[in-house]
Image (tube, rainbow, N blue to C red):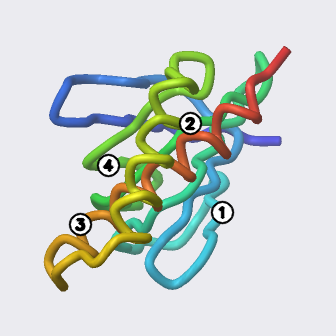
Amino acid sequence: MKSFPLKIVTPDGLQFDGEALELTVRTIDGDMGVMAGHVNCVSPLGMGTATVTTAEGKRSAACIGGILTVLDGLVRLVPTTFEWADKIDVERARRAEQKAKQTLEGSPSDAEAKLAEAHLKRALVRIGASKKVSR
């Protein structure tokens, strides 16, 4: 399997810069896989798990918002939030999930409900990604 150059950059800095065999991410239109030779494209990211496959194995992360670009073989993932599965604070994510659910069970305003729903989705993405830690 051929590799391709992949850079993952967030507002917090460089998360990955190397050769990958495959990248899977959640775009706003659904899951997308990228391999060497992929056509040029740009896609906004949704909320989901990203998986980077290298010669050393697979590594997953919670990946939320941002953009994916493929241009002349160079793949750039620029997510708003990107947390490697083995670095996710699962207890913190569970607390955020419970807090969001409690807010939604009450009588929140429309703005509070939308914010709580966003917090809930992010917490669930983090919890889901944390279960995909490579061992």
Residue type (three-letter) at the residue carrying disc 4: Pro
**Sequence-wise, which precedes: disc 4 or disc 2?**
2
Q: Secondary structure at mark 3?
A: helix
Judging by the rendered image, the residue that carries numbered circle 2 is 61
Name the residue furthest front: 106
Which residue is depicted at the point 62% across and 59% down? 34
Please give the label number shown on residue 33.
1
Residues packed near mark 2 inside 10 Å, few (<14), some (14 to 19) or many (20 plus): many
Q: Earlier in the sequence, mark 3 or mark 1?
A: 1
The correct choice, above or below, for 13 with respect to 110 in the image is above
Q: Which residue is mark 3?
A: 115
Quadrant of the image occupied by residue 109: bottom left
Q: Are marks 3 and 1 in contact (CB under 8 Å)?
A: no
- In primary-sequence order, the first of circles 4 and 3 is 4
Query: What type is the residue that disc 3 sits on?
Result: Leu
Q: Measure the C-alpha gap from mark 2 to mark 3.
A: 23 Å
- Element under disc 2: strand
**Whether residue 92 is visible:** yes
Q: Is residue 48 left or right of residue 58?
A: left
Q: CA distance from mark 4 to mark 3?
A: 19 Å
The tally of labels here is: 4
Asked if residue 31 lies left or right of residue 71, the reply is: right
Q: Is residue 117 left or right of residue 121?
A: left
Give the distance between the C-alpha atoms of the residues marked 1 and 2, in whole angstroms. 15 Å
